[in-house]
Image (cartoon, rainbow, N blue to C red):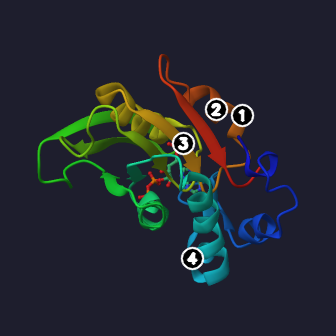
Amino acid sequence: MFAEENGLKGDPRLQHISQSIRVIPHFPKNGIMFQDITTLLLDHKAFKDTVDIFVDRYRDMHISVVAGIEARGFVFGSAVALGIGAKFVPLRKPRKLPGEVFFEKYSLEYGTDCLEMHVGAVQPGERAIVIDDLVATGGTLSAGIKLLGVEFSVFVYILFPLRHFLTYNCSLNLVLVPNMLYAFFTLIM
Ligand SMILES: O=P(O)(O)OC[C@H]1O[C@H](OP(=O)(O)OP(=O)(O)O)[C@H](O)[C@@H]1O
Ligand SMILES: Nc1ncnc2[nH]cnc12
């Protein structure tokens, strides 16, 4: 579900947020159009509007877990968690979490990686949202969904503050995880 189709059509905040993202060609390697959200973070209004839109949407949905994907999902996810009154659970890159972990390996647009989550961070039946800045191949998001949903049978709502425009259609196919209930919400088409 896109923000524009969900009551935010014509909302000037969306265009401002979109314009605050810098695109850097050929980073970190040739052919990648890197969507740089650090410029959004420099713009207080764009950053606040981004968080507010997600807080307004998820505030009254009985969400008790916001899982943020390292590293950029931490920035947006922790702000949304505070706003809706949920706990924040970091989904981290390998060998960063000190306790016992569940893990999921995945492939990226420029390599392979793995996500880990602390055992005990989420309880069966909790409702969670997974937050990251964008989706490219969908590998990272898919790993995040599996970490939460399959292990704990949680309801998973997915939102991205941003998304990778060029490969979006491909991403949606790849992130579908069978036998799970989840919904997408994105800000920018
Ligand atoms: O849809 P995908 O192909 O999986 O790519 C999307 C992921 O790639 C980026 O993170 P990255 O792994 O570069 O790590 P970072 O946030 O630490 O920079 C981005 O923040 C997403 O997490
Ligand atoms: N094109 C892209 N821009 C920013 N982060 C990314 N992660 C994977 N692909 C990316």
Residue, disc 3: 158
- C-beta proximity under 8 Å, tags 2 and 1: yes
Which residue lies under the disc numbered 1? 169
Q: Residues within 10 Å of mark 1 (few under 14, many from 20)?
A: few
Give the residue type at disc 2.
Leu
Number of the label disc, if any, that sits on residue 41: 4
46 with respect to 151 (left or right)? right
Task: Out of 16 and 155, give the one closest to the viewer.
Answer: 155
Viewer-side label of 3, 4:
3
Separation (CA) of disc 2 from disc 3: 12 Å
At label 1, the amino acid type is Asn
- Residue at the far top: name it: 179
Residue appearing at x 19%, y 53% in the figure? 97
2 vs 3, front mark: 3
Tell me the residue at 73%/54% (across/down): 188
Residue 98 % position (x, y)? 12, 54
Q: Rate crowding at label 2 as few (under 14), some (14 to 19) or many (20 or more) other CA atoms within 10 Å.
A: some
Q: Does any portion of residue 32 appear in the rendered image?
A: yes
Q: Which residue is mark 2?
A: 172
Q: Sequence order check: which comes first, mark 3 or mark 4?
A: 4
* Mark sitting earlier along the chain (2/3): 3
Residue at 38% x, 49% y: name it.
Answer: 64
